[in-house]
Amino acid sequence: MSDGTHMYFNTLRTDLPDIVLPTDPEYKEIAKAHLAFKAQQVKLEQSANEAKSAAPITDADTLELRSIFESDDQLLLPETDPYEVAVFVGNLNYVRKAPSAVCVPSTIQQVQLAVKWALSKNVHLTVKNGGHSYAGYCLNKGGLMLDMCRFKKVSINDAGTEVTIQGGCIWNDVYDSLKGRNLSNIIVGGQCPTVGVSGFTLGGGLSPFTRSYGLGIDNVLEMTVVTADGELLTLTRNETDTERRDLFWALCGGGGGNFAILLEFKSKVHSLRDPYAKVVCGPLSWDLSAPETRSQFEAAMKVFNDTVWPNELTVDAIWRYVGGKLMGEMTTIYNGNMKQCLEVIAPLLQFNPVNKLAEMGWHDWVVIEQGFDVKSPVYHTHASFIFGQGGITPEVTKAIITLVEDSTKLLNGRGKSHVLWDMAGGVDKDVSRDATPYYWRDGVYIANFKLQWMHPTMRPDMLKFMKRVRDTLNPYSLRGNASYVNYIDGAREDWQYAYYGENYSRLQQIKERWDPTNFFHFEQSIELPGFRKIPAPIYSNAPPKSLPPVFDTITHTSPVVFESDTTDIEPVVEVPDKESAAPEVTLLDQIAAIWDAFELPDPEKLWNLEDSEPSLEKVLMVLGGERVQATL
Ligand SMILES: Cc1cc2nc3c(=O)[nH]c(=O)nc-3n(C[C@H](O)[C@H](O)[C@H](O)COP(=O)(O)OP(=O)(O)OC[C@H]3O[C@@H](n4cnc5c(N)ncnc54)[C@H](O)[C@@H]3O)c2cc1C
C-alpha cells in the first residue's frame, strides 16, 4: 500500500477495484477504510503488547489479593506445599512456568473479583481445571493462576435428561454422580477420569460415545461464564442476540483459556442401548515383533480402515511397547452387548488378535494414563493429527510402526512412546464445519503421538524426533494440516489453521468483541484480528552484554530420583551418585537462570536453545528478537 496520497492497492473491500486512484470515485471511501484499519492495527498492537507484557505480582498485590481470598487455603504462595501441588501438572517440561500466586475461588464473586483485579493490575491470569493441557497452558509465568478445584458440584434434573457440571470437576466426579442415579446414564465425556470437564469441553470433547451422540460440545445446552471484564453471563444454544450467540459458539470448541472462565455447563444425558446397561470394552491386540502376527495386524488394519463401522462401535487404537514387545492394540468400546459386538467386529476377529473384550458397566471402564499424575516426575511432549475416512492406509500403518520402533530405540529404556487415536466419524460428521469452531467434522481418527522421557538431557533429541513425527504424518492428515486443539502441540507451526481451519477468522472477530485487550492469552491463544503473530514484548531493560549476577546465586536442587513408573515399560530408577549430586553449572542452567530473571513465559524457546550450542548472543536474540539484538 502507498502512503495514501497517490493510490491504494485495495485489499480491504472486495466490492471495490483492486487499484484505486485519487481520480476514482471510490478513492475517498477506500482511503477512510485504510486509515481506520491502520488505526485499529496500532490500537490492537498496543493492547496486545500491554497484555503480553503483564506485570509480575508484588507484595502489595498479594495483600490486595488477600482481601478477596482471605484464608490461607485460598491464596497459595510459592514455596508452600499446597502451591507446589497446585502448579505441578505432571510434566517437568513446565516446571519453569510458575505463577506468582494461585487463587482457589469458591464463589462466583471471587472469580469475578480476581478477573477484575488482574485486569486492573495488568497481571497475567490463567485458569486450571484438570491440569491436563499437553502444553501446560493452564500455567503462566509470574502471574495468577485460578485453580477451579472447588467448583465441584454435579446435579441432574428430575427427568434425568440434563446434567449441570461445575467447571472444576474432573470426569470422575461426573461419572460418580451419574452412577449413583442410574447405571444407564451416560454423558459425552472423557475416557480418562482425571481430565478436567472444562478443558475437555471448551476444546471440543471427544468421547467413546462421540460416534453415537456427537462431540461434547454438540451436547452442551448452556454455559455460565465470567468474561474478560468480569461480567457473569449465562448463555444458551438459543441466544437471539448476535454477540451472545457468537460467544456461545466460540466457547463450544474454540479452546480452553481463550474467551471466558467456564463456571458451569449443562449437557444432555443419554442412555446406553443395552437394557441391562452393559457395554463391551477391552483390547484386541497383536504382537508386532513377530513377523506372522505383524502381517495379520497389517491385514486387520487394512480391513479396519476400509470399513465404515456402525456408530455403536468405537475402535480407538494404541501402538506401544508392552514388556519389550511392540503391540498393536485396538481398544474396542461397543455400546451394546457381547453377542452384538462379536457380530459387528467379526471382520477383525478373523485376523486372530488376543481378545480381551469383556462385558461391563460403562463406569467400570475408565482409563488412567500415567504421565499426568502428580507422582510422575516425567517429561512429555505430543503431536496430533486428524485423519479422514480411509486415512490409515498401509503406508501410514508402516510409517507409524517405524516411528514407534525408532523412538523406542532412541529412548533406550529411559521413557516410552506411543501413538493412539480416538475414533470419531459417526453422527458428529453430519454436523456442518461452521456449526462450531471444531472444523474437522470429516475427521475419523484423532491421533496423538506421545514421547515421554525421564532425563532433561534427552529433551533436544526428543523434540527433534517429534519434528520428524510431524513431518512424516502431517501430509496424511486432512488437508495436510489437521490437528486437534485438545491434543494441543506447543511446537506446532500454523496451529491456527491446524486446529480451527476456516473458522479461525470468526474466532478472532469474537475475540475482539469479548476480549479486546487479549486478557486471556497463552502461546497459542486466539489472536486479535489482523495479528497473525503478536510480537514479543519489548524489554526496555534489555539484558546487559555480560552474564547477569543471577549466575552467582544459582542453586542446585538434587537430581530427580525417578519413582517407579507404573506402566508396562521397565522403569529406570536413577540413584544419584556423588558426582551427580553436585552437578556442574552448565550454560543451559545459566540460560535458564536468565529466563527466570526476566520472567519469560515461553519454555519452548528455551528448548530451542538446548538444541544447539547455546551462547549469550543466541539467548538475547531469542529474548527480544531483532529489537534487542539491535541494542547490543
Ligand atoms: C490422559 C489424557 C486423556 C485425554 N483424553 C481425552 C479424550 O478422551 N477426549 C478429548 O477430547 N480430550 C482428551 N484429552 C485432552 C484434554 O481434553 C485436554 O488436554 C484438555 O484441555 C484438558 O483439560 P483440563 O481441564 O484437564 O486441563 P487444564 O490444563 O486445566 O486446562 C486446559 C486449558 O483450558 C483452560 N481452562 C481450564 N479450565 C478452564 C475454565 N474453567 N474456563 C476457561 N478455561 C479453562 C486452561 O487455561 C488451559 O488453557 C486427554 C488428555 C490427557 C492428558
Image (spheres, rainbow, N blue to C red):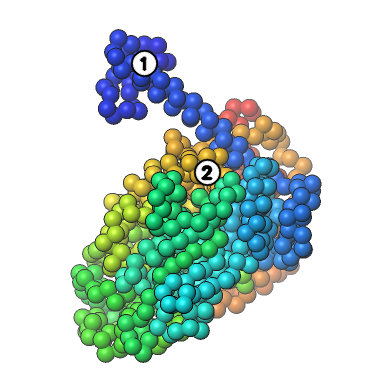
Residue 75 seen by the camera: yes
Q: Position of residue 224 (x, y in %)?
A: 52, 58
| Marks 1 and 2 in Cβ contact (< 8 Å) | no
* Label 2 residue SS: loop
For the question of whether residue 326 can be seen, the reply is: no
Above or below: residue 165 compared with residue 275: above
Q: Earlier in the sequence, mark 1 or mark 2?
A: 1
Give coordinates of residue 327: x percent, y percent. Answer: 37, 77
Q: Which mark is residue 92?
A: none
| Quadrant assignment for the C terminus | top right
Pick the front one: 428 or 314: 428
At a point 37% along the width and 79% down the height, the residue shown is: 271
What residue appears at the point 44 percent right and 27 percent down from the top-left corner?
37
- The residue drawn where x is 28% and y is 68% is 426
Is the residue 4 above or below the residue 217 in the image? Answer: above
Dot 1 corresponds to which residue?
28
Q: Which residue was labeled with disc 2?
A: 515
What's the amino acid at mark 2?
Answer: Asp
Q: State which quarter of the image contains the N terminus.
A: top left
Callout 2 environment at 10 Å: few (<14), some (14 to 19), or many (20+)? many
- 161 vs 77, left or right, is left
Quarter of the figure with residue 582: bottom right
Question: Is 461 or 189 nearer to us in this picture?
Answer: 189
| Image position, residue 509 (x, y; %) | 43, 41
Q: Depth check: 174 or 49 in front?
A: 174
Report the residue at 52% width, 43% height from top.
515
Q: Characterize the local packing of mark 1: few (<14), some (14-19) or many (20 or more) Cα atoms within 10 angstroms.
A: some
3D distance between C-alphas at marks 1 and 2? 31 Å
The residue type indicated by label 1 comes to Lys
Of helix, strand and loop, which one carries label 1?
Answer: helix
